[in-house]
Image: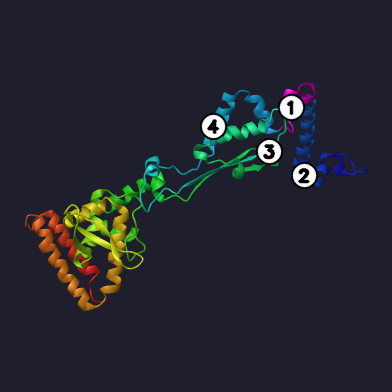
Amino acid sequence: MVSLLGEDAPRSFSLLYEKADINVLEDIFDKECGKNASAMMDDLAKGDASQKMRNVNILEKIKKEYNSDEALEEFIGNLVKSAQCYLQFNDEEIAKVIPGNENKMMRMIQLCLPEYNDPSNFRDKFIRKFAEMCPGGSFNPGDCLATNYKPNQIVVVAAASGFPLRFVANVAVLKNKYEEKQIGQRAAHNKMVLHTESFREELPSLFEKSKNEKEKALRPTVLLAYAMGIVTDKTEQATGKSFKAIGFADIFGNISNWMDLGKNILQSVETLATKDADAQKVTNLVNEKLRSEYMHIDKKDSLKKELGRIVNCEVLPLCGNDDLNPVYKDYLNDALKIVETKLTVQ
């Protein structure tokens, strides 16, 4: 500090005040204190190597403090847990296998370690224990290990990617809140506020639908399949069993792959509700025919009449010819909605 005054200048605090501001003085104090502290720590280490505090490799420190396998495993286990993603995941949803909504989540943990050479190869042991503590093989030393050039630092990074939204625990809470807003006097208003965009087709559900929800969604598709004549009567030659079926063409255009849909239209809906892959195939076939073969007004009128016939001649008898039966009313309402939304003349 005195050197700031110059060699021939008088020694006084007032002159020092003129020559240096607070930042300069703080910098001098920091440098001098750091130099003295380093010297004292080096002197302490010379007398007792276990008291070494400067230039200590973190792996060396861990080796001394966690000198048993049990203690080391506990330390590494806590290290892995503390480096997990902030997102909370729903284990039940992760365990589900849903066609078209599969578990594709990738978990990865990266470890960045300083080099440390000692006769016991403690660094290799640390890496081996770390791999054992990481869940589901999420850590692969060949791909997920890097060298940290700061000897006093270990870095652990955990990441999860490529997962459907249903895996996130908070999404279920948001779903419940959304459904609450779809009920009551303000339901229409809330739907307008919540849905800032509209889509030609309904977006796929984030969560697996219940059997009833699947049947409700499939009723219009099956009604159209019957009305289009896609569904036909088949009989097994060996057993004499009769059933409704949809045929799919092979690579040569021959209809040979027949899908059993039960004995009637109600069973067809129930059957497809339990077979997601088959339901998707039927849905794709119906949508394709609707786009390619039912654009003309005459074709649409013909399909309307056939829908009415299916509802009144096939569904109604299965409901005891009771036009107040809730199942019949569901199919009737679905048929009317198809006419209003898919068969209107543009």
Nearer the observer, disc 3 or disc 2?
3
Disc 3/disc 1 C-alpha distance (Å): 18 Å
Nearer the observer, disc 1 or disc 2?
1
Nearer the observer, disc 4 or disc 2?
4
Q: Which residue is mark 3?
A: 114
Between disc 3 and disc 2, whose residue precedes? Answer: 2
Disc 1/disc 2 C-alpha distance (Å): 31 Å
Between disc 1 and disc 4, whose residue precedes? Answer: 1
Q: Residues within 10 Å of mark 2 (few under 14, many from 20)?
A: few
Residue ID at (63%, 38%): 154
Relative vertical location of residue 79 with respect to residue 278 in this rendering, above or below? above
Which of the two residues, 263 or 84, is positioned nearer the viewer here? 263
Residue 24's label in the rendered image is 2
The amino acid marked with disc number 3 is Pro
Residue ID at (18%, 64%): 335
- Quadrant of the snapshot with the C terminus: bottom left
Q: Which residue is mark 1?
A: 52
Which of the two residues, 209 or 298, is positioned nearer the viewer here? 298
Q: Which residue is mark 4?
A: 77
Could you say whether the residue bearing mark 4 is in a helix, strand or loop? helix
Q: Is residue 116 magenta-colored?
A: no
The amino acid marked with disc number 2 is Val
Between disc 1 and disc 2, whose residue precedes? Answer: 2
Q: Residues within 10 Å of mark 4 (few under 14, many from 20)?
A: some
